[in-house]
Amino acid sequence: MGSKPQSNKETNMWPKGFGVKLETITPFLGKYRPFVGRCCQTCTPKSWESLFHKNIAALGFHNVILVTEENTRYRGWLVRRLCYFLCAMDWKIAPSPDAWEKVLGSKWIQEILSGRAPGGAGEGPKPSSLRRDVQHMSGQIQASIYPFLLRIFNWALLKFLNCIFLNVQLHQGQLAMVRQAAQAKDTPLIFLSTHKSCLDGLLLPFLLLSQGLGVLRVAWEPQSYSPAFRALLRHLGGLFMPSEANLFLDNPKGILSRAVLSAAVEQLLASKQPLLIFLEDRPGAVGPRLSSHGQAWLGLVLQAFREGAISDAALVPVGIGYDLAPDVQHGGPRASSSSLGLWWGALAVFRGLRGRRGCARIDFAQPFSLQEYSVNTWSRGRSRGQSLEQLLLQTVLGHWSVLPDCEKQQEWTPMSGPLMALEEEDQLLVSRLSRHVLSASIACSAVMATAVMAALLLHRHREGVFLSRLLENFSWLTEETLLRGFDVGFSGQLQDLVMHGLCLLHSSLSLWLLPQGDVLVLPRTGPTLTQLAHHSAALLPVFLCEAVGACAVRALLAGRVPPEGPWELQGVELLSQRELHRQTLLLLHLLPQDLLLLQPCQSSYFYCQEVLDRLIQCGLLVAEEAPGTRLTCDTGNWRFGEKMLWRSMEDFSDSDSDYEDGTDSRCFKLSQQLRCPDFFLFLCRLLSPLLTAFARAAAFLHQGKLPDTELGYTQQLHQFLLKKAQEDGSFESTDLSQAHSAVMTFKDLGVLKEQPGSTGSTLHLSPTFTTQENQEKLENFIRQFICG
């Protein structure tokens, strides 16, 4: 994604006479651009083969907000000034069907009106009263679309987007792939998206409408918007879940509301209108990453499929990336409110006029069949695993040395009314599908220039860096990102890209012109570091596998050599494969699934194997022969073991590590290449913010005031994290979501116990952790994974 030439003011920031190599950053490996977002070959093999666009690499990008007279049917001087309006008038908007009559005639409503369903006419109000309630609730969910209002709104939105973004890029090949899937299967498109900004719900419908895919219906969260704004969004294609839908399962109003909601979704999908659901929670929300609201809507789609309203649906993971999201404050993280108020709109326009405009990128992963996924998931059976307390507590306390060979069960997302009304098997399927799709959406999201810059400054050059070296590191980290199968949302001259990132992050940086002609770039100390932490978090999924492995290696070395010891001394130590697997598994159990987002078809053991392979591939670990063992290269006398160690059904690799003879004898050492120490430290620091918050949560156990509510204790911990950051400057570990993750993890681990009461549930300290000794064991267990 190229950017426009920088202004003269920005160009003058470069020191005169500074020799910069005019290297061009291109997001290509070899001849073709890497394709990201292939669907899972294990769960959806038919979709993986049939719904892939063969010419996707040959198609380029399109800036959807660049509208000229060439995009209209007319030419001329006046057209150039009215091209936005004329283009909006030409967009095709299909008439919306009469939803009310179809909702009233659905089997859900007819069963209630006839009294055959619980809460029906035979048990309560008269049919005429129920009809009025059904009409009222249907109006709360959706409304008729006004085409002229939709065109005027998107015309204004197009002008607004040009004020706050340099460009909004869309891959033409991905768009063609989505069109092909819609035509091939003749089923509704369900877009399942990440949620990076409050603008997402307006940007995606504008994008699809302008590209001829029709009016996108958006499932909005009603709590964040005023009644007047909800009414406007409904006439623009918005859908809202009525509040009564979350009432108890035996409540008559809740039964009626869920029936109307199910009928409305069935009617919508049967008419093949595309639907957008945000599977990631709204920006700034404190809680689980997976949205309970999004899962509830996905459950309604699954219910419509089960009831035969649709034969299938094409699920399309969507990734969104911003250089600088419109609702990001200058000196901190995202705004806590998701309201589309005038204050952030005015701020975004003002930022654009000041030249702080960033870029945006929308990516569509490969669509896949809901029917195929559900059939393959059922065929593999169900396994809920064990709790974190069963898996990890005894190891933390030093009582176990062998970990149970079982998957972790961790469900933080609260169950909403529509989801609880489903069968247990369907609830489990929605949970698995949500994690699967959100993982795919994040994997296909492009890494933006601000994420690369923030990660370098926060995790590699915290003490400052010369601009000449920063240029080299930016190019290196971009290449490493592409090598791991992720795409980047930028291209162009290296000098322009680095300047673009520095300008967008200038509120968190200090630039010092040196007499030698170079520039010293220093991250500002204090709360402004939270902005760097927010942007650098977008790079964590790229290196998550290696970061987990590096922290596991750090834990192994922690008890052998001093943490500050030289790299050469650490490289002497032999690390067995069994030890590496154990430490990796310990860390995987500790980290929340919201961060890892492991696909349900992938076992933890298989992920440990992948972590070890990644560390070898990136050159951090080299194979070493253990004393007294047969050489690895001596394959003449290898024999099959009596028992094949198939630890995961999906691992069909034919390697020596699958047999008893070679599993425990493989050893490794840290590589002694010059780049390895810096890269190892960079990987460890990617996870350090969260692990530091966890360690401080363990240290806070004897200071926290308990009993308290979950929210109250989370706020107590957050204040403690802020206090510790004031002492040592670690503001990247002060996010409220990190405090929430620590509290939820400690609940799963059995450190904090939840007890019901007359006024609600409260948290109490477990009797096991009332002693300072066990609290210190927990803190030391977490700190072994943290590296400087």
Image (cartoon, rainbow, N blue to C red):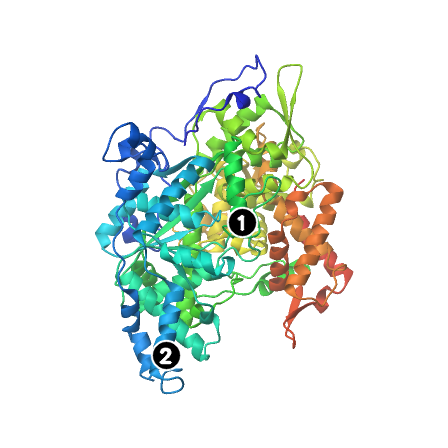
Question: What count of labels does the image hold?
Answer: 2
- Asked if residue 277 lies left or right of residue 619, the reply is left
User: Does 53 sit above or below residue 6?
Assistant: below
Amino acid type indicated by mark 2: Leu
Question: Residue 235, percent across and down?
Answer: 36, 57
Question: Residue 673, percent across and down?
Answer: 57, 29
- Asked if residue 133 lies left or right of residue 415, the reply is left
Helix or strand or loop: what does disc 1 sit on?
loop
- Asked if residue 287 lies left or right of residue 192, the reply is right
Residue 240 lies in what quarter of the image? bottom left
Question: Residue 449, percent across and down?
Answer: 49, 33
Amino acid type indicated by mark 1: Asp
Residue at the spot 48% in from the left edge and 49% down from the top edge: 198
Residue at the spot 54% in from the left edge and 62% down from the top edge: 412
Residue density around tag 2, few if under 14, some if 14–19, many if 20 or more, within 10 Å = some
Query: Which residue does the numbered mark 2 point to in the structure image?
Result: 130
Given residues 62 and 374, the one toward you in this image is 62
In space, the residues marked 1 and 2 are separated at their CA atoms by 69 Å
Specify the label residue 79 is tagged with.
Answer: none
Q: Quadrant of the N terminus?
A: top left
Given residues 149 and 558, the one toward you in this image is 149
Nearest to viewer (mark 1 / mark 2): 2
Query: Which residue does the numbered mark 1 point to in the structure image?
Result: 664
Q: Quadrant of the C terminus?
A: top right
